[in-house]
Image (spheres, rainbow, N blue to C red):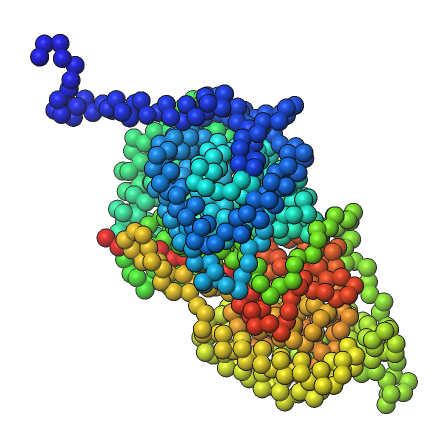
């Protein structure tokens, strides 16, 4: 027909132009922004709110154009939001599991109608998260919402949860926190970053359309993550979880120190991850993987390429071939390019050579993809790489050396291993101290994979069933204590006040109080300082005994002994660890009368009650022995082709400041939790009731536990807490003490990052609501004594 504009299939394939539908569909996100006059308000109580007299923050799209603005919330907005969340929690937690699951599932069908708008908004904001990923998250956590009362009947929701993310965090990193919190029955206050604010506001609106009660999900936008600290000031907030870069996370931890609200930390941004290529790898596939992941325009992590020397030339040749003709990568600013060029110049001065796709342009915020060959592990551009398209390349000879290089980074987020040898892949994966390991693949994620932050990459577990427990508390625990106000502290002087040293009275050796020793490196010994402190009877009466006044040097010696023995203990079979714990229980039974007498004299309990506590402690050690080989990781059902494995790894060296209540039972409960899971432990007995722990040293001496695995140091609680906090090797601290100690630990234990479990006990010796006789305490303690690792093995 003359004048016809209809194109045939042949014409379309010749021109390869986009069809009219794809071209017109780009208006959906713009239409939603136009509907809000490109000025997005806060989302409170199920509706958009735009208070008057508020500052706003302009957002640019991925092309640098002005997209919209968001409101900067103030304290009045926070109060209104928290009040709405309290009412929302009452309605949401009152629903059945099936009703909550239906709401999350309904959002899946709603996304089918509005998915294009969500995808475009994510793309415009640079908050990468595909529609299929969102659907997968909703489907996975809706099923857990359905099963919560069936599989986790002994756990209850926390209440109000605040999810805070930094500006450079992805939407996926935010939703992996929000959706499980909702699925477990909590109400959620989201403090999004700049890029995630518009998509999460849209999702909050869509969730209301799915039937979410008003107030269950609220969104507060602000200028930075300091808004999260304002949210933490509310006494109704039960938990804060943060994702993003470490700098903002440290600022949030310090700002919330002393408020009495736990804060977890997931620094998704900026970690350095090893990309390991063995000589048994498919080199072509490995190099393709390097190109795909290392030179993206926006990367959440920095990669370091580790290549076995025997295939170095082959890898470099293929890199040059694949990089030929690659375009320059856009940077955020010209200042960032200056930093990249400075890093490259310094690398060349250190003898490194470059493989570049093209010459760098004379000006502008762009830089070509660059491989820095001959990098040393100690080089600044390896330890703290810039944000540009730089890929340091290091070589290794043996498999052991590859693991050493992979663990060289202070971060422990992820690793990619390339080899056709499955045995080598699994051995390397288990030896790497990272949360995720991808075999012959990279950057794969799924909500069913439990991933913990190892080393400096986080203090909580996200994904899988294990990631749900951060939003739950044991039903046996008493209600959390009310929030406190931070006290004015000089953190540099905490724990420096020396204990009143005494000289034991030996004028009458027959009647003199007994001097005790502490236990370090498998030996009973005095404190390095040589000082002692008096242990008085209940009510401050006569002196019962003298115990060593331990300090920083004693902690240092204990950590040195623990570090030597912990890797070997962790590698022991679960049955071997179980036998040692059974032996410890038998040893306690043999010393039953002596230990019961120490409890009787120290606490004032009757001998009958003291013997009951000893009997419970013997049973508790036997419980931990039985636990060793019963609860482990396993295989996970994957939505894609391939297999996935999860491992419950030990934390490393754990410091435990013991509670005052049930001094023996609480000690063996916490001691058993640490060593049953492969950790080494440094115990600081109750300053008020140290004698039961000191009497237990005789049991430790007669046991077959490796020397240095368990250490007991007595003295000033504050002084020893400060020593534990400032030791870089200690991975986790469990603390029962005063409010000042909790505030000090939360403020201090951010560099290096430590996993904290803080329980403030008052003058009446309440210790965070723990019922040490309840069997659920075993499951609770086991979960905080391990960190999770997931290994992804793809198939064709």
Q: Position of residue 469 (x, y in %)?
A: 52, 58
Of the pair 747 and 479, the residue shown nearer to us = 479
* Count of marks overlaid on the render: 0
Q: Is residue 341 visible?
A: no
Q: Is residue 494 left or right of residue 445?
A: right
Task: Using the image, determine if residue 69 lies above or below residue 555.
Answer: above
Of the pair 356 and 346, the residue shown nearer to us = 356
Task: Using the image, determine if residue 26 lies above or below residue 558.
Answer: above
Q: Is residue 33 visible?
A: yes
Quarter-wise, where is residue 422 in the image?
Answer: bottom left
Residue located 90% across and 87% down the image = 508
Q: Position of residue 594 (x, y in %)?
A: 71, 87
Q: Residue at the right extreme?
A: 507
Residue located 64% across and 69% down the image = 771
Residue located 57% across and 78% down the image = 621
Quarter-wise, where is residue 436 in the image?
Answer: bottom left
Q: Is residue 675 left or right of residue 33?
A: right
Task: Using the image, determine if residue 44 lies above or below residue 408.
Answer: above
Q: Position of residue 553 (x, y in %)?
A: 71, 65
Q: Position of residue 2 (x, y in %)?
A: 9, 9
Residue located 70% across and 74% down the image = 663
């Amino acid at each position: 027909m003359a004048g016809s504009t209809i194109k045939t299939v042949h014409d379309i394939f010749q021109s390869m132009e986009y069809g009219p539908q794809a071209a017109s569909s780009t208006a959906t996100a713009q239409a939603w922004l136009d509907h809000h006059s490109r000025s997005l308000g806060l989302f409170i109580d199920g509706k958009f709110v735009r208070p008057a007299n508020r500052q706003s923050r302009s957002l640019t799209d991925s092309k640098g154009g002005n997209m919209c603005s968001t409101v900067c919330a103030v304290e009045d907005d926070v109060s209104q939001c928290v009040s709405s969340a309290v009412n929302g929690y009452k309605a949401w937690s009152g629903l059945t599991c099936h009703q909550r699951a239906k709401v999350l599932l309904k959002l899946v069908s709603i996304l089918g109608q509005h998915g294009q708008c969500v995808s475009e908004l994510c793309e415009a904001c640079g908050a990468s998260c595909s529609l299929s990923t969102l659907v997968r998250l909703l489907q996975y956590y809706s099923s857990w919402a359905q099963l919560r009362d069936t599989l986790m009947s002994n756990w209850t929701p926390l209440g109000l949860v605040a999810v805070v993310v930094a500006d450079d965090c992805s939407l996926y990193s935010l939703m992996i926190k929000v959706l499980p919190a909702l699925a477990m029955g909590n109400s959620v206050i989201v403090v999004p970053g700049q890029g995630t604010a518009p998509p999460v506001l849209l999702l909050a609106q869509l969730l209301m359309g799915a039937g979410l009660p008003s107030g269950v999900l609220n969104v507060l936008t602000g200028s930075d993550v300091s808004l999260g600290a304002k949210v933490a000031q509310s006494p109704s907030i039960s938990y804060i979880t943060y994702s993003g870069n470490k700098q903002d996370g440290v600022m949030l931890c310090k700002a919330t120190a002393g408020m009495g609200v736990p804060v977890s930390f997931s620094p998704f941004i900026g970690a350095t991850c090893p990309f390991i290529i063995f000589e048994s790898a498919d080199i072509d596939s490995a190099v393709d993987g390097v190109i795909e992941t290392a030179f993206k325009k926006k990367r959440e992590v920095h990669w370091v390429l580790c290549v076995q020397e025997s295939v170095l030339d082959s890898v470099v040749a293929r890199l040059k071939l694949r990089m030929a003709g690659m375009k320059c990568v856009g940077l955020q600013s010209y200042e960032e390019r200056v930093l990249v060029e400075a890093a490259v110049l310094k690398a060349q001065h250190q003898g490194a050579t470059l493989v570049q796709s093209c010459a760098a342009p004379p000006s502008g915020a762009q830089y070509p993809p660059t491989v820095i060959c001959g990098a040393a592990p100690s080089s600044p551009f390896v330890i703290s790489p810039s944000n540009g398209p730089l890929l340091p390349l290091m070589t290794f000879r043996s498999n052991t050396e590859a693991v050493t290089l992979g663990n060289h980074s202070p971060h422990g987020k992820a690793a990619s291993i390339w080899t056709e040898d499955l045995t080598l892949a699994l051995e390397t994966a288990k030896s790497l101290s990272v949360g995720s390991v991808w075999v012959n693949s990279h950057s794969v994620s799924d909500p069913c994979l439990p991933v913990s932050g190892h080393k400096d990459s986080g203090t909580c577990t996200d994904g899988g069933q294990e990631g749900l427990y951060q939003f739950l508390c044991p039903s046996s625990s008493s209600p959390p204590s009310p929030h406190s106000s931070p006290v004015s502290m000089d953190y540099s002087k905490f724990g420096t006040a020396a204990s009143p040293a005494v000289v034991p009275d030996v004028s009458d050796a027959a009647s003199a109080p007994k001097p005790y020793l502490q236990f370090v490196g498998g030996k009973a010994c005095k404190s390095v300082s040589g000082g002692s402190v008096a242990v008085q009877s209940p009510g401050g009466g006569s002196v019962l005994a003298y115990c060593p006044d331990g300090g920083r040097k004693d902690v240092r010696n204990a950590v040195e002994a623990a570090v030597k023995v912990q890797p070997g203990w962790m590698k022991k079979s679960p049955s071997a660890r179980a036998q040692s714990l059974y032996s410890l229980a038998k040893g306690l039974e043999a010393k039953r009368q002596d230990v019961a007498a120490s409890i009787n004299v120290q606490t004032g309990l009757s001998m009958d009650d003291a013997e009951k506590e000893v009997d419970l402690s013997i049973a508790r050690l036997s419980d931990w022995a039985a636990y060793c080989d019963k609860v482990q990781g396993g295989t996970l059902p994957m939505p894609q082709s391939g297999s996935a494995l999860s491992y419950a790894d030990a934390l490393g060296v754990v410091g435990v400041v013991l509670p005052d209540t049930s001094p023996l039972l609480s000690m063996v409960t916490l001691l058993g939790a640490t060593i049953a899971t492969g950790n080494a432990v440094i115990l600081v007995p109750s300053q008020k009731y140290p004698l039961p722990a000191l009497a237990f040293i005789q049991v430790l001496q007669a046991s077959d536990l490796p020397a240095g695995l368990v250490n007991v140091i007595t003295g000033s609680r504050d002084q020893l807490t400060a020593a534990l906090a400032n030791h870089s090797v200690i991975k986790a601290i469990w603390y029962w003490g005063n409010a000042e100690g909790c505030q000090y630990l939360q403020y201090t234990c951010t560099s290096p990052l430590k996993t904290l479990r803080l329980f403030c006990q008052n003058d009446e010796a309440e210790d965070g609501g723990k019922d040490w006789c309840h069997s659920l305490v075993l499951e609770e303690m086991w979960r905080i004594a391990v960190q999770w690792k997931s290994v992804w093995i793809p198939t064709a």
